[in-house]
Amino acid sequence: MLSRDFLTDRGYCCGHGCLMCPYEPKHTKDNTILKVINCFKEDNPLIQKKLRRVTVEEGYEIATKLFQILNERGDGIGLAANQVGIDAAVAVVNVKEPIVLINPKIVRKEEETRYYEGCLSFPKKGCHTKRYKIVEVETDNIESNMTFGAGDTDTDLLESVCVQHEIDHLNGMRILDRVQELTIRRSKPKIGRNEPCHCGSGKKYKKCCIN
């Protein structure tokens, strides 16, 4: 059991039902059970909405919740606030190390690439998207800009794509909005064997230029 002095020094109710909690009403702050909203089964009105800017202090509080959810699930490397129903421009990434993005903005991108990615909000619905190998990101919680994907490893690229994925969420964009279909285009229409040859000889294609 936590002491009353400890709880008083902390300054707020943790929401875990401590018997010695000095706050009234008890257990009302930060006691919401959050989870990733499955957009195939539940409505998430924030998933395609540009999220509001927040203070750095509020951003870190939300980021703590997001990391807790990622740790509990164990199947994700990034999470944005609107994926759990919070209207706040905050996301977290944990590929090489834990990263908090508060009001992030991509200010530079280089080397377009195609990448197959999935999303916790749309389980089992991966798709190919257009991304960039290198991105530079500006956030309110870090003084200097951060650059992702500058290394040569697959992990560097994964981290860069994950950052782009989460920033997309904060701007109301889903991976389904970035689907890249693989198509094969013919430079010339296919000619049937019995059709007139395209060279203008008047002969059938099979008896003229087919070979």
Image: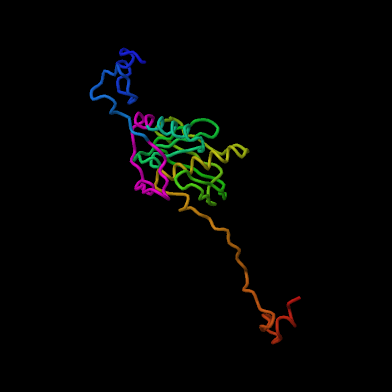
Q: Main secondary structure of the magenta part?
A: loop
Image quadrant in which the N terminus is located: top left
Question: In the depicted view, which residue is nearer to us: 150 or 23?
Answer: 23
Question: In the depicted view, which residue is nearer to us: 46 or 121?
Answer: 121
Which picture quadrant has residue 83? top left
| Residue 63 place in picture, x, y as percent | 41, 32
Which residue is painted at 57% across and 47% down in the image? 111
Colour scheme employed for the rendering of this structure? rainbow
In reply to whether residue 193 is colored magenta, the answer given is no
Which residue is painted at 38% across and 42% down in the image? 82
Image quadrant in which the C terminus is located: bottom right
Relative side of 26 to 208, left or right: left
| Residue 53 place in picture, x, y as percent | 34, 38
| Residue 71 place in picture, x, y as percent | 48, 32
Which picture quadrant has residue 182? bottom right
**For the view shown, which residue lies furthest in the bottom direction?**
202
Question: In the depicted view, which residue is nearer to us: 116 or 105?
Answer: 116
Task: Relative to 202, say whether 181 is above or below.
Answer: above
Question: In the depicted view, which residue is nearer to us: 160 or 1?
Answer: 1
Which residue is painted at 35% across and 39% down in the image? 86
Task: Relative to 163, say whether 13 is above or below.
Answer: above
Task: Relative to 98, say whether 86 is above or below.
Answer: below
| Residue 2 place in picture, x, y as percent | 36, 15
Number of numbered discs overlaid on the protein picture: 0
Find the magenta span and give its range: 34-61
